[in-house]
Image (cartoon, rainbow, N blue to C red):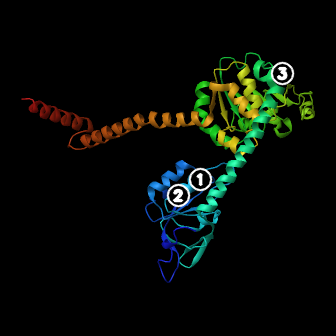
């Protein structure tokens, strides 16, 4: 482990001592982080941008709840910190966050143990330059292997589903439900319920076509909304949602086999099938909405990013990547719309608070003026106004 001269500053309690700062998303230590502190972070695959933020504060050590390099992507962040002489320890787990109090002095030993005085808080694994370089090289090769396989599968998918991607072959007809309108596709993931609540003003203002995907259809119904369409396996969707009057679209295999058809028949409702090799109901919903020429498609609960592709996330397969490329500029993540409405709401009510303050001030003045004299309330107001008018008149003489 590098920079051993930083240790053994205290003969009685060996180790590097400094204020512990909770710099995770749950803490506020980043604002107070300064030179010589012990920064606690939760950053798997520490990015270059995050490392630069840490470098600006010059902590003595960075203690990671996760691993600095998981092997998913080759990242430069750890090397940047080590080159600056900052000690790195990883793999503490959540115990370190639960065990520290921001600003309290901690003691980090050479073998990666964090103490508060003589009390052990958590243990991690020290990272040196050699291990960081080894992890980077292995992650780099792993990413290359993964992406070669990924784009091989992408080519195979294009071969099998080119008619769907190009001409929309197999997409069910929904009539004029979608054309020219805003569409909100709600998928069951990534805090979709809370994000949907944040979009209530958007829904109220634009009345978008609501499409519930799999179990997210239940969320729409539970929050008082009526989905226009439901896309997904009905075995995981509640009867109330399926009977809500929405057009139900069942994903089907290319040969026509449909999972969950028996449930639809038992409930006595109609449904259309969507034959495709696409496994994600969210991808099918996006292709369905896009085919029917909407003005905009907002998706909640189903984002796919390049980082997800690199990390090999299950929902970031070639179908997801090509689907979002097909939808193109019409697709907007629900978090973006929610943020816009949060800004608008906070700003639009500011003038109401200002007006309320003025009205309260005027009311206080009227009450004081009306009770200041010996006459009636109205007479006191008149006397006060006349006195004020004469005073103002005198200013201009």
Which quadrant, please, contains the C terminus? top left
Q: Residue 253 is drawn in which quadrant? A: top right
Gap between marks 1 and 3 measured at Cα: 43 Å
Which of pointers 3 and 2 lies earlier in the amino acid sequence? 2
Q: Residue 172 is drawn in which quadrant? A: top right
Q: Residue 199 is drawn in which quadrant? A: top right
Q: Is there any visible trace of residue 25 in the rendered image?
A: no
Circle 3 is placed at which residue position?
170
User: Under tag 1, what secondary structure?
Assistant: loop
Which dot marks residue 46?
1
Camera-side residue: 331 or 328? 328
Camera-side residue: 141 or 324? 141
Which of the two discs, 1 and 3, sits closer to the camera? 1
Which of the two discs, 1 and 2, sits closer to the camera? 2
Gap between marks 1 and 2 measured at Cα: 10 Å
- What's the residue at 74%, 44% (across, down)? 146
Q: Would you call the spot at circle 2 few (<14 residues within 10 Å), some (14-19), or many (20 or more)?
A: many
Camera-side residue: 91 or 340? 91
Which of pointers 1 and 3 lies earlier in the amino acid sequence? 1
User: Under tag 2, what secondary structure?
Assistant: helix
Residue 167 on image: x %, y %: 77, 18
Q: Is there any visible trace of residue 202 in the rendered image?
A: yes
Which dot marks residue 81?
2
- What's the residue at 74%, 32% (across, down)? 212
Which of pointers 1 and 2 lies earlier in the amino acid sequence? 1
Q: How many labels does the image show?
A: 3
Residue 321 on image: x %, y %: 71, 33
User: Under tag 3, what secondary structure?
Assistant: loop
Do the numbered discs 1 and 3 sit on residues whose CB atoms are within 8 Å? no
Q: Would you call the spot at circle 3 few (<14 residues within 10 Å), some (14-19), or many (20 or more)?
A: some
């Amino acid at each position: 482990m590098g920079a051993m001269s930083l240790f053994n500053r205290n003969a009685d309690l060996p180790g590097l001592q400094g204020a512990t700062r909770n710099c995770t998303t749950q803490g506020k230590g980043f604002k107070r982080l300064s030179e010589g502190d012990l920064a606690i972070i939760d950053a798997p695959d520490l990015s270059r941008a995050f490392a630069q933020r840490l470098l600006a504060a010059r902590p003595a050590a960075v203690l990671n709840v996760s691993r600095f390099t998981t092997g998913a992507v080759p990242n430069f962040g750890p090397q940047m910190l080590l080159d600056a002489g900052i000690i790195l320890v990883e793999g503490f787990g959540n115990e370190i966050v639960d065990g520290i109090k921001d600003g309290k002095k901690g003691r980090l030993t050479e073998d990666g143990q964090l103490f508060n005085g003589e009390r052990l808080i958590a243990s991690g694994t020290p990272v040196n330059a050699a291990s960081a370089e080894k992890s980077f090289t292995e992650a780099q090769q792993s990413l290359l292997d993964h992406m070669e396989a990924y784009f091989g599968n992408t080519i195979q998918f294009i071969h099998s589903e080119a008619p769907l991607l190009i001409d929309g072959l197999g997409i069910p007809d929904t009539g004029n439900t979608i054309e020219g309108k805003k569409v909100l596709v709600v998928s069951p993931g990534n805090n979709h319920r809370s994000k949907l609540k944040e979009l209530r003003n958007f829904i109220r203002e634009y009345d978008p076509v609501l499409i519930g995907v799999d179990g997210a259809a239940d969320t729409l119904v539970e929050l008082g909304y009526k989905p226009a369409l439901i896309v997904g396996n009905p075995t995981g969707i509640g009867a109330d949602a399926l009977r809500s009057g929405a057009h139900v679209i069942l994903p089907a295999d290319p040969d026509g086999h449909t999972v969950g058809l028996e449930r639809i028949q038992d409930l006595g409702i109609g449904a259309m099938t969507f034959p495709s090799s696409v496994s994600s109901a969210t991808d099918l919903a996006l292709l369905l909405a896009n085919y029917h020429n909407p003005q905009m498609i907002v998706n909640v609960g189903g984002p796919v990013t390049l980082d997800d592709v690199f990390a090999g996330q299950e929902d970031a397969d070639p179908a997801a990547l090509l689907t979002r490329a097909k939808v193109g500029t019409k697709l907007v993540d629900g978090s973006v719309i929610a943020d816009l409405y949060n800004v608008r709401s906070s700003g639009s009510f500011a003038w109401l608070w200002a007006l309320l303050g003025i009205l309260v001030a005027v009311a206080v003045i009227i009450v004081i003026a009306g009770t200041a004299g010996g006459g009636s309330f109205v007479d006191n107001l008149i006397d006060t106004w006349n006195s004020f008018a004469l005073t103002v008149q005198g200013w201009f003489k």
